[in-house]
Image (cartoon, rainbow, N blue to C red):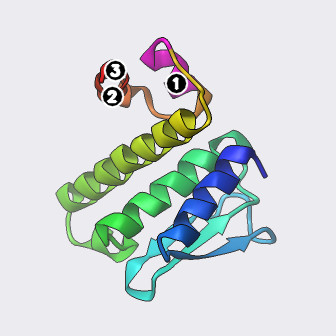
Amino acid sequence: MSDVTTYLLNYALDHHIGFELLNEVDSFWPSLAIPERNMMFINTNWYKQEELPMVVAHEIGHMIDGDSCYLYDQSTISRLKSENSANLIAINLLMKYCSDNDIEFNNSMTFLTQFNIPQRYENSVRKIIAG
């Protein structure tokens, strides 16, 4: 497990967020958060291992927001808002990891690439980097 993933799981523990690491499930089974049970299920067997830090940070974002995956049945707009919010929280958590570990990025694209963050978040990352 990478240092950043360990950092994020420790963040979850420090904030009383429960989780279970699943390493024997199908590699395409998505991780999920269930805030009502204060539990995240993280697929450590994810087929794109380089995405795991963003996946963990994203699920923490859902826990912080209190958004469950069952909301997706309500509407596309609710789903998009929930996913966007979880991604923005994830980006901030990854930025905190970088700050706490004296890791600097000169531009937003390098940060996005390093953490496998969708390019549509470039403006958000650029604003955070600019301070």
Q: Secondary structure at mark 2?
A: helix
Residue contact between numbered discs 2 and 1, judged by CB atoms under 8 Å: no
Mark 3, Cα crowd under 10 Å, few <14 / some 14-19 / many 20+, is some
Q: Amino acid at mark 3?
A: Arg
Amino acid tagged 1: Phe
Q: Is residue 58 left or right of residue 113?
A: left
Say above or below: 107 vs 4.
above
Where residue 40 is drawn, which disc sits there? none
Looking at the image, how many numbered discs can be counted on the residues?
A: 3
Point out the residue furthest to the top here.
106
Magenta residues? 106-113
The dot on residue 128 is 2
Q: Report whether 85 appears left or right of 42.
A: left
- Which marked residue is nearer to the observer: mark 2 or mark 1? 2
Q: Dot 3 lies on which element?
A: helix
Give whichever of 39, 48 is nearer the camera: 39
Q: Residue at x 62, y 35 (%)?
A: 101
Q: Earlier in the sequence, mark 2 or mark 1?
A: 1
Q: Position of residue 96 (x, y in %)?
A: 48, 41
Residue 105: x %, y % from top left: 52, 18
Q: Which residue appears at 49% of the width and 12% of the height?
A: 106
Q: Nearer the viewer, residue 16 or 19?
A: 16
**Residue beneath the point at 46% across and 47% down:** 93
Disc 3: which residue: 126
Q: Which residue is mark 1?
A: 111
